[in-house]
Each structure stands twice: as structure tokens, then as C-alpha cells.
Image (tube, rainbow, N blue to C red):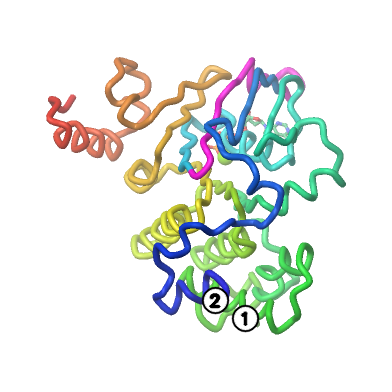
Amino acid sequence: MGYFRRLVRGRGGDRFASGTPGGSILSGSADDDFISVRDVDLAFGSRIVYDKLSCSMRKGGVHLLLGGSGSGKSTLLRMLGGLQQPTAGEVRVAGQLVSGLRERELGQIRKGIGMLFQNGALLDSMTVLDNVGLPLREHTNQSTSEIADRVGAVLSAVGLEDVEPLLPSELSGGMLRRVAFARAIVMEPAIVLCDEPFSGLDPLNVTRIEDLLMRMNRDLGLTVVITSHHMASSLRMADQIILLRDRNCIAGSPEELAGGDDEGVIEFLGEDGRAYLARLHELEGAPAS
Ligand SMILES: Nc1ncnc2c1ncn2[C@@H]1O[C@H](COP(=O)(O)OP(=O)(O)OP(=O)(O)O)[C@@H](O)[C@H]1O
Ligand SMILES: [Mg+2]
């Protein structure tokens, strides 16, 4: 029985902790440099997005990309997924070079990576069943009924029932978001790259998606990289914050960044973030700033 079916039946607990998600080459490497960006430059014409950007992400970690609009969050996610090549520098995922690979070579790596795009990117002419089942049809030999079963289970896990025959145009914004998220995780990938997973969701569904990501992180060792303006949720989840600014980044745990004296960081976290970090300080016995 698949992970999502067990999850929906309420039996997906700690006993899956030894799972090897993705079942691909991405399950092979274990270290703090699971995802590594080294001295990356990227420019679109005269617009410089990154200038010697370097950062690392840990296997099984939850990494939150923050930064102003246009700072390069979505572009970084696309680069990790091999959809955007840097102008210079190196991007590695699980020890595998992603930058500079050809499409055919990237296929193997992408099998282990689930991507939720900022704009959803569902195929308008395909039903929900076909959209969510697409990665399974592309990358596995599962039968039509096995795929339908897995798709039904993952849709239940994101709080959607009986939507399989519908077209994207027949769904609400929040439903579309969850269908796109279901497609990103249906392969039980080793890594999920989520661009604004909470946008357009009501509070109940924000909690539902947050819980699901955290459970997959705990049960399957899923490495999560998200961008989010939903500060309270994303800070609660994050092991590491990577704040993109000035064509580069500043990175650290929420605690480290909160404890630092960088006004810009605290400013950026906003009211939600500051309230969260103030609570964190209180819990640690330090005076809240
Ligand atoms: N394909 C592209 N062609 C040209 N410029 C691009 C392309 N993709 C991104 N850019 C530029 O790169 C910069 C970073 O864009 P990106 O979408 O990564 O920002 P972001 O941090 O995700 O912003 P937001 O918070 O608004 O989603 C922007 O200046 C954008 O105009
Ligand atoms: Mg973006």
C-alpha cells in the first residue's frame, strides 16, 4: 500500500521513518551539502540576478527562501530543478551536477524532485486525474488502476475528494493550488521545491499542507525547499532561512538570524515573523527584541 493511502487511513506514522523516497539516485547522498550552489552568477541581459551566490541545504532539511519580489526565489528553485542554467558556477543536487547537464541527463535527477510552480502550471486540457498522474505515467510502469489509486490517495491527503474527472477550469484557486501540490508530491520525491505553496489557501488548508509537508519530511526524510510570504507557517517549519538580497544571500537557522543584529533581516520577517521570533526568544529565556 502506498504512503498516501496509509496516511489517509491514519496509519502513516513514524514507522515509515526509514523510507527511501523517490527510489532514484537522489536517495544515495547524505550530508549537509545535499543541495549545493557554488559561486553562481546569473544574468538576464543586463539584469543581474545573482553575483557569486553560494548556499547549501541539508538532506532532510526544511529550507525557506525569503527575499523581496524579483530577488530570485523562483529562479533559484528553477535552477535546483535544472530548469534554469546559471551563467557561471555550479549547482549540485545529491552530489550530481545539475548545472550544465543536457535534458536527457536531467531526466534521471528530476525523477527524485517534485516541483510546485508559482503559477501552478497545470495542463488546461487534462483532467485532474491526468494532471496529477502525469509524473507516474512518465516515470513508472504503474498500471492505469494503480495510478488512479495513488492519485486518489494523494488528492485525499491534500483534502480533495472526487475531483479526478474535473478540468482545471472547473476548480477554485485554492483547489488548483492543492492539485498542483498533489502532482509535486505524487512520486514521493526525495526533494520537493515549492514556490508559494500556501498562496490562495484558506487557513484550514494552509495547516493541512503544512502538516503534510512536515509529515513527509519526518516520515520519508523529504528535503523541502519553499518560498513563502506566509511567515508564521513557513518559519514554524524552517530549519534554515536563506534570505536573497543584493544578488546574494544571507543564510542561517531562524534562531541564528533572529539572534543576529542584521536590521534588514528582522525588517524583512515582518510582523508575523517578528511575533514568531519574539516567542522563540521568550521560550529560550532571551529578551524579545
Ligand atoms: N526567463 C526570464 N527572463 C528574463 N528575466 C527573468 C526570467 N526569469 C526571471 N527573470 C528576472 O529575474 C529576477 C528574479 O525573478 P524571480 O521570479 O526569481 O523573483 P522572485 O524572488 O521569485 O519574485 P516574486 O516574489 O515576485 O515571486 C527578476 O528580475 C525577473 O525579472
Ligand atoms: Mg517568485
Along the viewing direction, whichever of 283 and 71 lies nearer the viewer: 283
Residue on which the image places disc 2:
153
Q: Position of residue 36 (x, y in %)?
A: 62, 29
User: How busy is the neighbourhood of tag 2: few (under 14 within 10 Å), some, or many (20 plus)?
Assistant: many
Q: Which secondary structure, mark 2?
A: helix
Residue at x-position 32% and y-position 33%: 270
In the picture provided, is 277 more to the left or to the right than 251?
Answer: left
- Three-letter residue code for mark 2: Ala
Residue on which the image places disc 1:
149
Q: CA distance from mark 1 to mark 2?
A: 6 Å
Q: Main secondary structure of the magenta part?
A: strand
User: How busy is the neighbourhood of tag 1: few (under 14 within 10 Å), some, or many (20 plus)?
Assistant: some
- Three-letter residue code for mark 1: Asp
Residue at x-position 37% and y-position 28%: 268
Q: Position of residue 10 (x, y in %)?
A: 39, 75
In the picture provided, is 39 more to the left or to the right than 258?
Answer: right
For the C terminus, the quadrant is top left
Along the viewing direction, whichever of 79 and 126 lies nearer the viewer: 79
Q: Which residues are magenta?
A: 43-60
